[in-house]
Image (cartoon, helix red, strand yellow):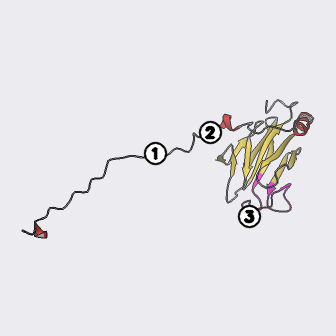
Amino acid sequence: MPTEDPADQKPQESVVPNVETTISFGTPESTDSARARVALSAQESALVQALPDGTSILIAHQGPGSGSRFLLDTDAVTAGRSERADIFLDDATVSRKHAVFERADGGFRVRDVGSLNGTYLNRERIDAALLHTGDEVQIGKFRLTYYASPQSESGQ
């Protein structure tokens, strides 16, 4: 029986198919579709309807402090981990001085004040942005939904 010399053997070619793979985890949400996804309870709806003209409210629907409500009724409302903040958000993901809600154009705008983790509006990082009813503001792990007074021109 003849034996084959290993030096005479041809190396086998490795065949790698030309395959491209794309994985999708859903479509990105537009700013408009991200608004008003959270249904208000009857009590929350009545609270929003009773807001005086020129005021607004933030309601925590997700994350720590779910169910908490924060009234925006002054020219500037601070939010952060500092106990001196108007809106005290106690979590390591929140900077001591994180964001400020300021009166603007008959409603409010949110402005990041140099936080480490950023401030997000409808899942997009922002420096400052005008708020509209149903917008979701994320500060650290806290997700707050904004509702303007129905009597105000803004947010309708």
Circle 3 residue = 92
- Identified by mark 1, the residue type is Thr
Residues 149 and 61: in front is: 61
In this rendering, is residue 48 above or below 74? above
Q: CA distance from mark 3 to mark 1?
A: 35 Å
Quadrant in which the N terminus is drawn: bottom left
Circle 2 residue = 29
Residue 76 position, x and y percent, is 83, 48
How many numbered badges does the structure rendering display?
A: 3
In terms of secondary structure, where does tag 1 sit? Answer: loop
Which one is earlier in the sequence, the residue at label 3 or at label 2?
Answer: 2
- Identified by mark 3, the residue type is Ala
Point out which mark residue 22 bears. Answer: 1
Q: Between label 3 and label 2, give the one nearer the viewer.
A: 2
Q: Between label 1 and label 2, give the one nearer the viewer.
A: 1
Q: In percent of the image, x 66 and y 37: which residue is there?
A: 31
